[in-house]
Image (cartoon, helix red, strand yellow):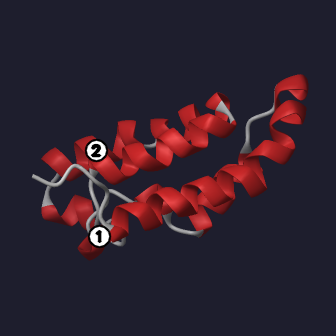
Amino acid sequence: MDYFLNEDQKAVRDLARKIAEERVVPVRAELDEKEEFPWGPLKYLSDVGLFGVYIPEEYGGLGYGSFENCLAIEEISRACIGVSVSFAASGLGSYPILLFASEEQKKK
């Protein structure tokens, strides 16, 4: 059994780490001080596709799984727990759709 990350998993981790370092760390103190929602970092995470890391390609996602989503969350958490919780919370709505929705609903 291979206990190491494969190349795709490393790519997801590295992308999340790069975004966390470049887009989250510089604004985290200001977001906390102003008690603002992290729209900027989250928009960027969305633009690069990380919000869809666990969504199958047939529904517009990157086609990976929950493990890759956890890798992204872990890297973002290193930079700012507030941003990572907001990022992770997106799955609260999409996972039930992936698991239990009709095909028509999933395509929306």
Q: Amino acid at mark 2?
A: Tyr
Q: Is residue 47 above or below residue 41?
A: below
Frontmost residue, 78 versus 107: 78
Label 2, secondary structure: give it.
helix
Residue 107 is left or right of residue 101, and the answer is right
Instruction: Locate the C terminus by quadrant.
Output: bottom left
Distance of label 1 from label 2 (alpha carbons): 13 Å
N-term-proximal mark, 1 vs 2: 1
Mark yes or no: residue 62 visible.
no
Residue 82 is left or right of residue 27, and the answer is left
Label 1, secondary structure: give it.
helix
Frontmost residue, 57 versus 103: 57
> Would you call the spot at circle 2 few (<14 residues within 10 Å), some (14-19), or many (20 or more)?
some
Q: Are marks 1 and 2 in contact (CB under 8 Å)?
A: no
Q: Is residue 22 above or below residue 71?
A: below
Q: Position of residue 50 (x, y in %)?
A: 49, 60
Q: Which residue is mark 1?
A: 59
Q: Position of residue 23 (x, y in %)?
A: 76, 54
Q: Amino acid at mark 1?
A: Tyr
> Would you call the spot at circle 1 few (<14 residues within 10 Å), some (14-19), or many (20 or more)?
some
Residue at 67% x, 50% y is 20
Q: Which residue is mark 2?
A: 95
